């Protein structure tokens, strides 16, 4: 998904911006390693 230029300034490390219906939402993301699956 391509984000508009005005929303790009809100993008930070460890965050994700999603477009849902008529709004943009910013979420914090965390990656956890799973030893059984050997994936994040």
Image: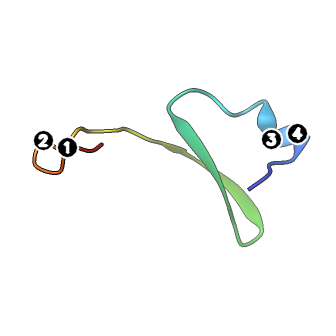
Task: Tell whether 29 sits left or right of 36.
Answer: right
> Disc 1 to disc 3, how far (Cα)?
34 Å
Residue located at (57% from left, 44% from top): 16
- Quarter of the image for residue 7 reads top right
Circles 1 and 2: CB atoms closer than 8 Å:
yes
Picture coordinates of residue 33 (x, y %)?
23, 38
> Disc 2 to disc 4, how far (Cα)?
39 Å
Task: Please name the residue that numbered disc 4 is placed on.
Answer: 6
Which mark is on residue 38?
Answer: 1
Task: Tell whether 16 sits left or right of 21.
Answer: left
Colouring chosen for the image of the structure: rainbow
Circles 1 and 4: CB atoms closer than 8 Å:
no
> Disc 3 to disc 4, how far (Cα)?
4 Å
> Disc 3 to disc 2, how far (Cα)?
36 Å
Task: Please name the residue that numbered disc 3 is placed on.
Answer: 7
Task: Please name the residue that numbered disc 2 is placed on.
Answer: 35
Mark 3 secondary-structure assignment: helix
């Amino acid at each position: 998904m391509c984000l508009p230029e005005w929303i790009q300034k809100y993008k930070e490390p460890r965050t994700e911006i999603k477009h849902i219906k008529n709004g943009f939402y910013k979420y914090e993301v965390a990656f956890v390693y799973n030893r059984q699956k050997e994936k994040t």
